[in-house]
Structure formats: C-alpha cells, structure tokens
Amino acid sequence: MVIDVELEPLSIEGNLFTKPIFMAGPCSAESEEQLLCTAVSLAEMGIKIFRAGIWKPRTRPNAFEGVGSVGLQWLQTVKKETGLLIATEVANVKHVYEALKYGIDIIWIGARTSANPFAVQDIADSLRGVNIPVMVKNPINPDVDLWIGAIERINNAGIKRMAAIHRGFSSYDKTLYRNIPQWQVPIELRRRIPEMPIITDPSHICGNREFLYDISQKAMDLNFDGLIIETHCNPDKALSDAAQQVTPDGLKAIIDKLILRDPEVNEELMLTMAALRDEIDKLDDRIINLLEERMHVSERIGNYKKENNITILQTKRWDDMLKNRLRLGTRKGLSEEFMIKLFRSIHQESINHQTSVMNKE
Ligand code: PEP
Ligand code: MN
C-alpha cells in the first residue's frame, strides 16, 4: 500500500536541492571556533548544508548533553560567515521554538524521538503554519510503520518539504556496526512513500570512520538521495561521537571516491537484490562473530592445556570432529569438499590461537 503524503521537492528560498544532497558538520556544537573552523572548510568544498547538534540525547547521564541555546547563535554566525544553510535536531516543543527564533533552516527529529508518537505529535502541533523543511530519522527499532507514522504526523501538520534519514537500528547483539543498517527498512519506506527523499547517515550506522565510505556507496547504489556525515575539524577531541567523525578532508576523500550510477537500471530489481544482499551481509556478520566466539573458546582450551602440560593437537579428537562436521554439513546440502576445506581452515586458525596462548609468557 502506498502511503498518501503530500510532498514538495526539497528546496530553500526557491533553490532546489540537487541530488545527491550532502550534509555535514559536527555531532555537537562545542564552541563558535569549532563550528567555524569546520564550516569554512565544508563551504570551500561545496557543501551547502551544515549540521550540528545543540541538545544531545545521550544514552547515559553525565555525558556531554550539548551546549543548549547559545549554540544557536554560533550557528547563526556560521550562516552569516559561510552562507551555509544550518540544520539541527529538535526533540521537544521548546527546541522547536528556539530553533525557529534563531533562524535555523532545517530541523530534524532524532531516532529516540521518532520512536515516541506523543513527542512527535507535540512537535508536529508546534510546527503548524510554519514553513520549514523537516527530516525524520528512523526510530531506533526497525519498525517501518512507526517511522512512517512519525512522517505522517509531521506531514499532517502541513510540512511538505520533508526527508527521511536512515541512521540504522539498535541491536543487543554485538555487530560490526553501532546501529545495523537493515537496508530492507528504508527500502520498504521507499516502496510505501516513493517520493520521500531518503538521506543515509553513515556516521551513526558505523560508529567509527572505517566503514563510512562503504555505507555511503551503498546508499548511492540504492539510489538514495543524500548523505549526512558527521564532520569535525578535530574529530579525536570531539565531545560526542569522536570515533565516527571525520575531518573535512576525510569527508572530501569519501565524496570524491563515490561512484554515482545511473538510476535508470530497473530500480525494482536493484532494490530486491539489495534486500537479499543485506541478508547475506547480516549472516556473514553473524558467522564472523561466531568464529570470534569459537576462537575465544579455543584460547581457553589453550590455557587449560598449558596449565596441564598437554599437547595442542590431539589427533583422535580432530579426526572425530571432522567426521561429525562432514556428516552434519552434507545433511544440510553442503558439499563434502567444502566442509573439509572449511573445517581444516577453522581448525588451523584454532591451533594458531592456542599456540599463541600457550607460548605467551
Ligand atoms: C545525531 O544526529 O547527532 C544523533 C543524535 O543521531 P540519532 O538521533 O540518529 O542517534
Ligand atoms: Mn552524533
């Protein structure tokens, strides 16, 4: 079922945003100097929209919770000095009034807030009659209806310039990502609201700088509309989300490397493939975590063998194990050849882990 939302193309003062839309800026505003030194470099490289959090929703108390309204004045300075459009997160009605008072150009609703219909409705009511673009992050849980519900609440208040931000989803399991991307969720959002621009937030998906490019490229390959990437002039010293922020040069390297493909190739096919590949990625992630867990157990055995002065390789155990795994694997349709290669290689890696444990001083 396609959802009925009334949208207008994303633009500000009549200037249409061209795709891909890049937004960048620090996780949090920390000082006027920090904002300016980041913003000047971003403006020089052609970025048009500057993000900075003023009120920070933090998981635990006593972390840096944002500078509050004084940061809005610094954002005004950024706008005046660089011409960048300024964007910030709002989580309640007071934030909306403050953001509007200080001429913020674009607001977004954070993942924790999108998960709460009461909070979203309050924000929507406070925006009635206000003509400002609003971006809605996915809720922290992978519930596409909740995400759509938040979008509808804002849209029903008369907001027509909107975008959805895909920032990944919390999970209890340890994974490669801070928030697993679950691409099938934004893909489903696109199916239900085809005209809604989707901006991917690789920073909060990754939680580190390492995979930012891969996630960004994947968003482009899915024909999503843009990226919002946390950028800081001195990321290692950032007061929040230090590990995932990049320098403006780091951001430029990511953008320069992006391959923008022709979206005309059968989008339906591309989206189906992407959903399947996402499943493969998740399974591989689980396989890697299981292997890690397996090696930890091997290391514990290594310690035990060391304490009791037993040799690493016990041929009978290895022989029994291989036979048993072969039987299990072939029953599941995996070839004998593959099972032998796989378990030889896992066994060798285990021996290597045990050797290093046993030879540690
Ligand atoms: C942010 O963009 O700084 C932020 C807090 O993100 P999220 O709501 O996605 O956690
Ligand atoms: Mn952040």
Image (spheres, grey):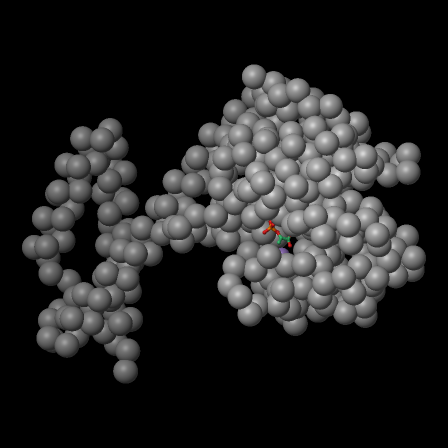
- Which quarter of the rendered picture does the C terminus lie within? bottom left
Residue 293 seen in the current view:
yes
Q: In terms of depth relative to the viewer, which is nearer, 265 or 9?
A: 9
Question: Residue 329 location in percent, x, y?
Answer: 21, 36
In the image, 49: left or right of 337?
right
Q: Quadrant of residue 223?
A: top right
In the image, residue 348 above or below residue 332: below
Residue at x-position 55% and y-position 56%:
207
* Quadrant of image for the N terminus: top right
Question: Left or right of 319: which side holds 112?
Answer: right
Residue drawn at (75%, 39%) of the image: 127
Please tell me how many numbered marks the rendered image carries: 0
Image quadrant where residue 218 sits: top right
- Indicate left or right for 145 with 288 as reference: right
Percent position (x, y) of residue 317? 10, 55
Q: Quadrant of ligand 2?
A: bottom right
